Image (spheres, rainbow, N blue to C red):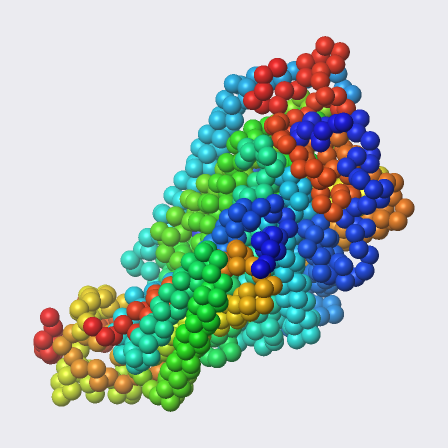
């Protein structure tokens, strides 16, 4: 049974205040991430409005099956994360840890799926460069954004997996008590990563398919 | 290059810019003097131990002062903006009869083509009192053509045309240089703008080799590259007729309507699949890597000449048949 | 027993060791090993880690420009190849912008003072604070290594297609270093905002905060919102250069101007990241040495906020000749004029603070007054380059170089020096040598003007920037500028000497050597590790200055009333 005060950090004088502080901090971080991804989406939007036909041709080559499976996996993982947070609020340690583990599993599934999809994309030669199979040249713009968007998202997801894993392990070993504000913070980040995929999905998988 | 090559205001526009500059210098000088004297004055008068009166300023006065100088500053700055903006707006209208000079920038030189077809390196010869429009592109990185005596500069971009126009009012030799960092020899990518009287310019033009009409050279290229094979009105292959096309609205296959300007003609030659004319099949091959920038300039000049009322390259009205339905 | 000092009222009668429990116990003595410093979560120690690092990077960037200014005394090269010259100016810009100016005041004074000024024991996330420093110092060291060993000649602006397709050198490494250092900015910003919101002492309402705190708050907003855009811009450059992905490649439909938009969307607010903290410092120093409350506190707060907000809307004024439409040019020009107004208000308010004050000229004050003058000139020349026709001629010349150095060096560095001197006693517990400091302050002011005023002239005549070789007619101006730079260098090296000396031989500082208001002066010099033995309760307005040494009017003379109070 861990002491609530093990969750208390300098310079906070009470846990409730600290929890609010973590919420403020994590949301500010999310805002910065919104601008980070937002810049990417802006670039995509500019080029799509300039070259709609090329984007349609290029977008028809993305693998909707993989994209949709990944969407499902992430949505489910967010559900698991929500349950984890709820359980932690009710101080149900075992369920919290199980749900965190489930989140990790589903997230890892996403990365696996993504890896298979990348393999297929490479086999189709969809790497911008001299041997790109599609015409006109602006189709390479779409695919450049595909590779950048999905890999940046994947890095965020992988980082999230590590963080969730560390959190679960610290809870398991009683290093952190169940009342730690870190759970809420990590959950917010995870939901953000999920939301980014929800935005990426139509941009990459639904263009060129009406 | 003497300082005249930089400092001379070689056009009316340049003189206007200088006027704005000196206005700003005056205003800034006065404000700086004001702030500096206030700081110096207060520092002296209110230094520790002086017996100046130090009573409190009423709060209402303070607030009035603050609002006052905020409003005054805002109005002053808006005035300066308006003054400068009206300079800029009046400079935007390119006169219709501007003589076009083409400039191609590359690391680390300027290649210039006169309308007569004459070519220069790192020099632009121009007649005085004639509106000149520079049509510029780069072969590699972003450069910038800077003409200090005209108080003008414009970035020069790859795969795009940018423009500068001016009417020089003073003859002379003026500095021309690159003003966008472009690599190792950026600082020696310089040259001269030579403004001459009309007779001198005509003499100079005639003395240049290759002083053949750009459009005429373009017509030769048009045939040599095989363009007339499809675009000739009598051709079997169904390709858009280029007579009268320059400056006109062109309906495209995806429903958009674009204007046939230099950029459109250039794209049609280098990337024909980009904008297909409505009613035509996308069968035109790309000439990227086949046509150089100089040749591009000549081809564009030729196509433009097909829209001029009477020009050597224009086919007579009788030759023109409506080829292909134009929606 | 006396309660903890009430904020806002200077207490010169306070014994020097007030606030210290045990004799000599301060944050400096809490752990003497290197490891205790490298694993600290104490915001005060982290501030010192930042101070040491940025000083090192400042001098590296400074040596680069010293070499360049030496090279430029002759028009056709003295001892550098053009390759080397181009790499040196890029190194100078990259280091000075990202590894000195951006972290300077927030990383050092922001870290040290923010918790003290609001009556807190530390920032909201002390471990994140340490991470901030590590991110910064490793990223900067990595980038500097790349710049010094392989070199990059793209300029600090990394314009494509030169940076992606034509530049040789370690572009990716340098861009990656800057990218990672951006996380440090964002983390610091998040920390400061959360701290200001959540950790203010009882009674410390928003409008009782010192202007320095407001400056830290607004600059943190800008850091959090702008830096990610830079991060993505650099990431895209790296992706294009490393993997040949067409993002800005015009041969495949990309647009190099898009990069410029994204880059400047960060880099214009970045200059406000550099100036807002400086304004905060000056707003602390001038009232103290004029013994008078800041004129127009509320307007000063609104001005900070307005500058931060409108600063996001003016980036296109860096692109007037880039190929932007005339309409866009007009809009950005208009907004650039608007953003100048709140800055002007601040200059007037600082000046008005002197009116009916009781002024002395210690080194911090000399630097602060120098700031006001140089920032005024820098800001006024900003009006020049905000006017489109003027900027068409002046952009990419030395005119613009002079303009932004007046703001960043005449402005930010002067304010940094003002703050360094002002808070040196608090941070180190030692007094520095006042005569030497005044000498250095005057030397930098004169040297600075000698360096940069000639640059306005030669820029307007037509001397382009980033030029290794130049036309002969500009030589006299270049020589003037280089001689000025020599004087400026002396002014910057002197503090190393007398500050260093003061650490060993300086007179021990009392808690409040300047009789300044502000909670940081109500604790010992240097402060204890936990900042305050008891968290203060605040019930006074900021800058409640009376005639020196007194807490109430004497000799029947009227006292200075802080605005908002009745007599």
Measuring from the top left, give residue C331's x and y in whole percent. Answer: 39, 48
Residue B50 seen in this snapshot: yes
Viewer-nearest residue: A115 or B27: A115
Q: Nearer the viewer, residue C551 or B54?
A: C551
In the picture, residue B276 is in which quadrant? Answer: bottom left
Asked if residue A107 shows in the view, the reply is no
Q: Is residue C483 left or right of residue B94?
A: right
* Rendered-image quadrant of the N terminus of chain A: bottom right
- Quarter placement of the C terminus of chain A: bottom left
State the residue at coordinates (38%, 89%).
A123
On screen, residue A2 above or below B157: above
Give the image location of residue B315, x and y in percent: 17, 77
Above-or-below relation of C6 to C62: above
Residue plotted at (51% across, 23% down): B63
Compared across the picture, whether A140 is left or right of C127 comes to left
Which residue is located at x 49 percent, y 71 percent?
A161
Looking at the image, the residue that sits furthest to the top is C556
Numbered marks: total? 0
User: Where in the figure is residue C325, as x and y percent of width and height?
Assistant: 36, 56
Give the residue furthest to the front: A1
- Image point (39%, 84%), residue name: A116
Residue A45 picture location, percent across and down:
34, 65
In this view, A103 is above or below C29: below
- C198 relative to B103 in the view: left or right: right
Of B263 and B303, which appears nearest the observer? B263
Location of residue C209 (image quadrant):
top right
């Amino acid at each position: 049974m861990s002491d609530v005060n093990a969750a208390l950090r300098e310079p906070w004088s009470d846990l409730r205040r600290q929890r609010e502080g973590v919420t403020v901090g994590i949301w500010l971080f999310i805002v910065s991430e919104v601008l980070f991804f937002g810049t990417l989406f802006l670039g995509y939007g500019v080029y799509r409005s300039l070259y709609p036909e090329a984007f349609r041709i290029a977008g028809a080559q993305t693998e909707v099956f993989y994209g949709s499976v990944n969407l499902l996996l992430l949505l489910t993982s967010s559900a698991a994360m929500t349950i984890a947070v709820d359980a932690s609020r009710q101080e149900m340690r075992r369920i919290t840890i199980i749900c965190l583990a489930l989140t990790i599993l589903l997230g890892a599934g996403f990365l696996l799926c993504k890896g298979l999809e990348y393999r297929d994309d490479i086999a189709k030669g969809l790497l911008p460069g001299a041997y790109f199979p599609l015409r006109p040249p602006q189709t390479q713009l779409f695919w450049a954004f595909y590779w950048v968007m999905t890999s940046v998202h994947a890095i965020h997801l992988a980082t999230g997996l590590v963080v969730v894993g560390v959190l679960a392990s610290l809870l398991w070993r009683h290093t952190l008590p169940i009342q730690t504000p870190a759970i809420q913070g990590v959950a917010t980040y995870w939901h953000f990563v999920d939301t980014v995929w929800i935005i990426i999905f139509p941009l990459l998988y639904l263009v060129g398919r009406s | 290059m003497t300082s005249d090559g930089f400092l001379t205001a070689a056009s009316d526009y340049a003189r206007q810019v200088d006027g704005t500059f000196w206005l700003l210098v005056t205003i800034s000088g006065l404000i700086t003097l004001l702030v500096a004297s206030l700081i110096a004055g207060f520092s002296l008068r209110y230094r520790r131990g002086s017996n100046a009166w130090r009573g409190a300023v009423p709060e209402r006065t303070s607030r009035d002062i603050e609002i006052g100088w905020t409003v005054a500053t805002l109005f002053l700055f808006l005035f300066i903006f308006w003054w400068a903006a009206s300079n800029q707006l009046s400079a935007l209208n390119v006169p219709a009869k501007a003589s076009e000079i083409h400039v191609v920038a590359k690391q680390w030189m300027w290649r210039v083509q006169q309308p007569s077809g004459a070519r220069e390196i790192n020099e632009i010869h121009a007649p005085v009192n004639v509106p000149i429009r520079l049509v510029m592109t780069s072969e590699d990185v972003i450069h910038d053509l800077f003409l200090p005596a005209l108080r003008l500069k414009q970035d020069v971009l790859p795969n795009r045309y940018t423009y500068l126009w001016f009417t020089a009012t003073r003859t002379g030799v003026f500095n021309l240089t690159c003003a966008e960092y472009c690599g190792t020899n950026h600082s020696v990518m310089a040259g001269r703008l030579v403004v001459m009287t009309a007779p001198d310019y005509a003499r100079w033009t005639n003395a240049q080799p290759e002083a053949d009409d750009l459009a005429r050279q373009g017509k030769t290229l048009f045939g040599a590259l095989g363009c007339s094979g499809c675009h000739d009105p009598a051709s079997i292959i169904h390709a858009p007729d280029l007579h009268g096309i320059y400056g006109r609205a062109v309906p495209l296959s995806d429903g958009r309507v674009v204007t046939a300007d230099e950029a459109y003609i250039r794209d049609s030659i280098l990337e024909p699949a980009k904008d297909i004319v409505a009613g035509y099949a996308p069968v035109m091959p790309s000439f990227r890597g086949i046509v150089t920038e100089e040749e591009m300039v000549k081809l564009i000049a030729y196509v433009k000449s097909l829209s001029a009322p009477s020009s050597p390259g224009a086919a007579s009205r009788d030759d023109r048949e409506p080829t292909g339905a134009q929606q | 027993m006396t309660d903890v000092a009430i904020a806002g009222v200077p207490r010169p009668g306070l014994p020097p060791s007030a606030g210290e429990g045990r004799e000599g116990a301060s944050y400096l003595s809490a752990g003497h090993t290197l490891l205790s410093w490298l694993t600290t979560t104490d915001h005060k120690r982290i501030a010192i880690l930042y101070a040491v690092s940025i000083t090192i990077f400042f001098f590296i960037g400074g040596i680069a420009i010293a070499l360049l200014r030496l090279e430029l005394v002759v028009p056709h090269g003295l001892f550098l190849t053009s390759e080397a010259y181009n790499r040196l100016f890029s190194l100078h810009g990259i280091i000075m912008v990202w590894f000195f100016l951006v972290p300077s005041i927030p990383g050092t004074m922001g870290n040290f003072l923010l918790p003290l000024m609001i009556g807190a024991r530390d920032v909201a996330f002390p471990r994140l604070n340490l991470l901030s420093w590590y991110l910064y110092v490793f990223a900067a060291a990595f980038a500097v290594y790349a710049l010094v060993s392989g070199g990059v000649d793209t300029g600090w602006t990394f314009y494509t297609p030169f940076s992606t397709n034509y530049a040789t050198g370690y572009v990716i490494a340098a861009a990656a270093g800057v990218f990672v250092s951006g996380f440090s900015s964002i983390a610091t910003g998040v920390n400061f905002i959360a701290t200001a919101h959540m950790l203010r002492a009882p009674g410390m309402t928003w409008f009782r905060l010192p202007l320095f705190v407001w400056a830290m708050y607004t600059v943190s907003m800008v850091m959090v919102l702008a830096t990610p855009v830079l991060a993505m811009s650099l990431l895209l450059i790296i992706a294009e250069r490393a993997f040949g992905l067409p993002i800005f490649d015009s041969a495949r439909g990309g647009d190099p101007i898009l990069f410029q938009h994204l880059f400047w969307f960060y880099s214009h607010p970045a200059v406000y990241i550099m100036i807002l903290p400086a304004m905060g410092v000056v707003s602390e120093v001038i009232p103290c040495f004029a013994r008078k409350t800041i004129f127009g506190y509320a307007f000063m707060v609104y001005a900070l906020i307005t500058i931060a907000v409108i600063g996001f809307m003016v980036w296109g004024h860096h692109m007037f000749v880039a190929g932007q439409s005339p309409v866009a040019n007009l809009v950005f020009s208009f907004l650039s004029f608007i953003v100048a107004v709140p800055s002007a208000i601040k200059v007037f308010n600082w000046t008005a603070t002197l009116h009916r004050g009781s002024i002395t000229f210690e080194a911090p004050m000399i630097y602060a007054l120098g700031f006001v003058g140089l920032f005024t000139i820098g800001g006024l020349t900003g009006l020049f380059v905000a006017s489109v026709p003027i900027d068409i001629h002046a952009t990419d010349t030395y005119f613009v170089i002079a303009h932004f150095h007046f703001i960043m060096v005449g402005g930010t560095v002067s304010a940094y020096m003002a703050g360094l001197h002002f808070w040196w006693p608090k941070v180190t517990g030692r007094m520095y040598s006042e005569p030497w400091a005044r000498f250095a302050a005057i030397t930098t002011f004169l040297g600075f003007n000698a360096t940069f005023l000639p640059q306005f002239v030669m820029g307007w005549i037509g001397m382009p920037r980033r030029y290794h070789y130049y036309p002969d007619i500009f030589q006299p101006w270049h020589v003037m500028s280089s001689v000025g730079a020599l004087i400026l260098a002396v002014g910057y090296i002197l503090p190393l000497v007398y500050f260093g000396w003061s650490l060993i031989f300086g007179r021990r500082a009392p808690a409040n050597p300047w009789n300044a208001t502000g909670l940081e002066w109500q604790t010992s010099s240097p402060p204890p590790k936990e900042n305050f033995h008891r968290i203060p309760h605040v019930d006074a307005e900021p800058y409640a200055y009376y005639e020196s040494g007194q807490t109430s009017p004497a000799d029947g003379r009227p006292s200075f009333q802080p605005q908002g109070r009745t007599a």
